[in-house]
Structures are given as structure tokens and as C-alpha cells.
Image: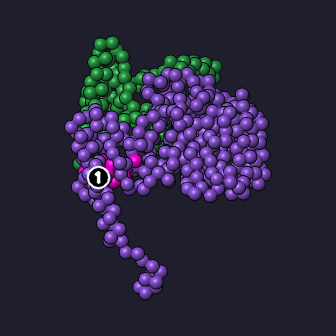
Amino acid sequence: MAHDAPTIAETLRRQGISRRGFLKFCATTASLMALPPSMVPAIAAALEKARRPSVIWLSFQECTGCTESLTRSHTPSIEGLILEQISLDYHHTLQAASGEAAEAAREAAMRENHGKYLLVVDGSIPLGNAGYSTIAGISNLDMLKETAAGAAAVIAVGSCAAYGGLPAALPNPTGAVPVSAIIKDKPVMNVPGCPPIPVVITGVLAHFLTFAALPELDDRGRPKVFYGESIHDRCYRRPFYDQGKFAETFDDEGARKGWCLFKLGCKGPVTYNACATTKWNQGVSFPIQSGHGCIGCSEPGFWDMGPLYKPLSMPIAPVQMMVGAAAAGGAIAGTAMAMRNRAAKKAAQAAHQKVTVDDLEKAK
Amino acid sequence: MPSTDSGAEHGNALPILNEIRHALARLLESGETSVIDLGALPMGPQDEAELLAALGEGEVEATINAGGPSSVRETAFHGVWLLTHRNEAGETLARFIEIAFVPELLMSQAEDVADSAAALAKKLGQAQNG
């Protein structure tokens, strides 16, 4: 099936898209894949030969937020992606078929594209008791093993599939594990985030589509092009951090002036993702631009790595060494901050009044 | 609503302007063109406005209708072009600054020219036969 399919370039040409339109497509694809514009000729050459890959998407212990995110992709749109660029042969939320017909579609795609299809997984896999999550009576573990066997590569989309995520949060009642804990004999790429940025999901699909291979990965199995730098290092508010200018509360002068949110618990310095440049909602904004710190949703241990509003203990070391005086201000602020936090915690505990059900009854 | 951070100056536009300055020098010296992907750079709400204000508007403006409208505009600095690619729904897909005598996408492409030559020959042939 996949062998006879037209190449991407041929498909676009049949739709009446000119070479100029194709080059535009390549330029936006390069931007989407976070590759430099100098890669456009290489992308054009690869797309001349690329054929629509078959994609099977399995959803296990997840909230469907990753699929919601995918459907918000505007470049390429989900319609464009499914109808023109990939052959999404199984995705039980998006496909029309259900029950036995759906499973038949999955088995047919596996058979016809054996060794070549791309397997995308969102959600974690329960090892505690198979009954926690099944599809068509098949346990998540069995379905993952069976489907991964004939896949060219596996993409774990979202923090649950990549690291265990919310289902794996302590005390992990279902014994949830990520894809990489089970699949050891295939390339597995992690695309974490809760959810991942829409165009990052389509970006990695576009990379596989274009080059018939996964992009270069870091030591946590993440594509370096999207997860190679921290939110902090790419944050437009970074100059304020270097100057020691911090918002102390969410409504002070610093917050209004858009200063650094480090002291309000921003996890940007320890979070690797593309939010600061790719942004969300068609590039409109991202949490820090909206005045809230990064919560580190794309890192391992998200949910169990401490309170969202507690500052990271100290500014990161290289900055102190690099920018001398300005960063020294930041380091002092870090120490002072820890003391102030303790004082604030005590004050909050003293001021805290517990409300019981009886109190609420009386208030009626 | 707190924290709209209007009026903040982050200074992220300045390094891009310097990059453009170096690219212009390369263009003059060797004819080498450069493309900067604005989607790959850290930009705050004021930074982009600052950058575009600094670049200003030039003499040429063109629209390419291929897979959705793309606007190509020369800035007040000759050889510095702002390209905005949109899809058919008008959503912005990517924005580039291209430093070139003519942006690549404005030029007709050899493949398209060959198709056109064949189409025109066919049309004339039909007219003569008809």
C-alpha cells in the first residue's frame, strides 16, 4: 500500500501547487521542525522522495489532552496532516470506526506496512492490574507489545507516555510505567509535555515523514531541536533575570513590568521545551508571557517534584560566573528569597483558619 | 488582569538587528543570502514591535498566492525583506527575514516555467487545430 502511494511532492503537484508553493511548504516545514532555513534545499530533496507513512496511534492511561493538542495544530492542520501527509490508520478518538472494525483497521495497517509504520502512544501503561485500562478487551501492555513489534519507530507523546506522568504520580496505584520501560528493541522517542505543544507533535511527525527517521535525541530520548534548551535560556524575560529584576508577587510592580518570575516558582531553568520560542495558540503566547511561571510539565517526575509556587533554591551556577555583578544580585536574592519563604510560610500557617463542615453548616 | 507587561523593554530586538547588519555585509561582499526564522528566537510582546519599527517599511510589497497568501515586503533597509507565510485560513505559519537582492520565492521557479512553456505550446496547438 505505502509503496505505491505518491510522494509528498507529487501529491502537492496533483493539487495544483506550484514549485514556488512547494518551496513555501518546505520553508514552513523547516520552521515547524525547528531546523535552520539553510536546511530548506535538503527538506525539498527529501520530500521529493518521501511517501505518506502509515501511523498507528494508541491511547492508554491518558486524559486525551495530547490528542486535543494535536487537533489544535495549524501547521500543518490536522486535516492537512491526515488527508495529505500521513495515513493515520488507527486512532480510536479520531477514527470513525469503532469496536471490531477499528481493531481490524489496526491489524490491517500492521500487516500491510509491517516494519515501516510509525507507532505513536499517548498515556502510560499499567503493570499493576491489566484491568485498569483495556481497549477492546486487550490490555494496554499486550496491545503495545503487539503493535510495536512491526513498527519502524515508536513516539511516546506526552509526559504520561514519556515518563509515566499523572498516572505514575505517587503512590502510583496502577503501577504505571512509560513506553520506554517496556519497548527496548525499537527506537523510542519521547515528546513530553502536558500536553506537548501542538506543532511540536506535528513537527516530529513531519520529521519522520520527511527524512524517514527520527530526529537526533538527547539522553532522555527527546528530540534536541525542540528540547535542546531550557525555557529559561530562551525566555524573553531572561535579561531581567540577569539584571536581578524579579516579580515578588503576582500583582506587584515587577509583575506589571514583566520581570522574571523565578521567585514565584518558575521552573523555566530546569525545564527543557520549545514553549519560549514556538509558543502556543498559533504562536500567540506562552505561560510566562501571560504572567505565570513555567510549571515544568515536560520534565520527568512532574507532579511529584515539589510545589508549583516554590522557587527553585538558587539561580543556576553558570549565570553567576558569566555575568558577574548582575548575577551576584541574583544569587543574593536567591538566599534572601529562601529566608523570606520560610517567614512567609510561618505567617501563612499562623493566618490559616481551618473551616470544618460544621462551620459551613452554621454559616447557612 | 495583572501582568500584561506592556511597556517592558527586554532588548531582544537588538541582537537580531546586528545579525541583519552582518548579513547585509555578506550580501554585498560575496552575494551570499541569509534567512532568519523569527519563530526560532525569543521575543516578548514589545520586542517584535520594536524590531519591526526599527526595520520600517520600504518600496516593495508583494503577495504570493501559493498554498495560502504570503506577504513579501522590503523594509526601509534595501535588501532586508520580511516574509510572512499564511495558510488558506489566513493563519500565520512562519515569519522570516531574508537578506537578499530578491527573495527566492519571488523568482519564478524553473520547474514552473517548464510547465508553463508546455501549457502555452499546447494551448497554441489547440487554437491552430481548432
Counting other residues with Cα less than 10 Å from the Cα at mark 1, is it few (<14), some (14-19), or many (20 or more)?
Answer: some
* Residue occupying image coordinates x 28% and y 37%: A320
Q: Chain of mark 1?
A: A
Q: Which residues are magenta?
A: A255-267
Q: Secondary structure at mark 1?
A: helix
Image coordinates of residue B77 in percent, x first then y, are 26, 27
- Vertical placement of residue A158 versus B17, above or below: below
* Residue occupying image coordinates x 34% and y 14%: B31
* Residue occupying image coordinates x 28% and y 57%: A340
Q: Specify the colour of chain A.
A: purple
Of residue A249 and residue B96, the one placed in the foreground of this image is A249
Q: Which chain is green?
A: B
Return the residue at label 1. Answer: A337
Q: Is residue A66 left or right of residue A246?
A: right
Q: Amino acid at mark 1?
A: Met
Dominant secondary structure, magenta:
loop
* Residue occupying image coordinates x 31% and y 41%: A238
Image coordinates of residue B30 in percent, x first then y, are 33, 12
Q: Is residue A269 visible?
A: yes
Q: Is residue A318 magenta?
A: no
Which quarter shows the C terminus of chain A? Answer: bottom left
